[in-house]
Amino acid sequence: MYKSIRIFAAAAVAASAVAAPALADRILSGEEAHQLLAGQKFTFACVDGTRGEASYTRSGAATAAYRLATAGDDAAVQQDQGRVHAEGGNVCIRWNNLNGGSEGCYRMTERRAGQYRIAEGATRWCDLTIRGMGERAERN
């Protein structure tokens, strides 16, 4: 599958080394990133143009609805489910379909309140924006 989807996986579901972070960016531990995003709904936009929405519960169940960068604006939105967990300094996710079902682990930084970046290396990243508090995902 596309590398950007693998990167999003932490995101997925939503979260690796940040691509050229600003000095003010705060690097989050894997557990801190997991706790911060668990139960939230958020949008994501990747450097390659892949965009969508995702959420995951405190128990680590993740869902994503996205459009690949190569898809036109009228293309169907794709959906996937996966599992998220913290591992050391990373947030890791294994999607059912994305990334061929392989797990990816990523570092996450807080860029400003409600805005985060997950990245793999210096050239592949996705920005995450927490949606309104009234749009929280299931907390389990």
Image (cartoon, grey):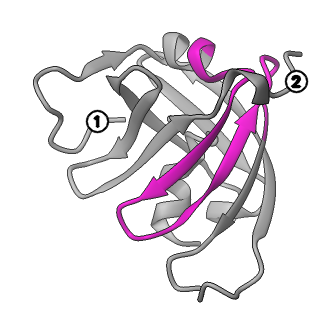
Q: Is residue 51 magenta?
A: yes
Q: Could you say whether the residue bearing mark 1 is in a helix, strand or loop?
A: loop
Position above or below: 79 against 14 = below
Going by the image, does 135 lie left or right of 115? right
Residue 105: give x, y in percent of width and height.
Answer: 50, 37
- In terms of image quadrants, where is residue 127? top left
Location of residue 136 with respect to 65 vertically, above or below: above
The residues tagged by marks 2 and 1 sit, at their Cα atoms, a distance apart of 29 Å
Residue of label 2: 138
Span of residues in magenta: 35-62
Number of labelled discs?
2
Residue type at mark 2 is: Glu
Left or right: 111 as drawn, with respect to 39:
left
The quarter of the picture where the C terminus appears is top right
Q: Quadrant of residue 31?
A: top right
Disc 1 crowd rating (10 Å Cα; few below 14, some 14-19, many 20+) is: many
Q: Which mark is residue 17?
A: 1
Foreground pick, 131 / 53: 131
* Horizontal side, residue 90 vs residue 34: left or right: left
Q: Position of residue 118 (x, y in %)?
A: 41, 39
Q: Quadrant of the N terminus?
A: bottom right
Mark 2 Cα shell of 10 Å, populated few (<14), some (14-19), many (≥20): some
Q: Is residue 136 visible?
A: no
Which amino acid type is marked by label 1? Ala
For residue 109, what is the image quadrant? top left
SS at mark 2? loop
Residue at the image point whose x is 40% and y is 29% from the top? 108
The residue depicted at 61 percent of the width and 23 percent of the height is: 37
Ranked by sequence position, the earlier of labels 2 and 1 is 1
At 20% from the left and 50% from the top, the residue drawn is 122
Give the image location of residue 12, x and y in percent. 63, 42
| Residue 51: mark | none
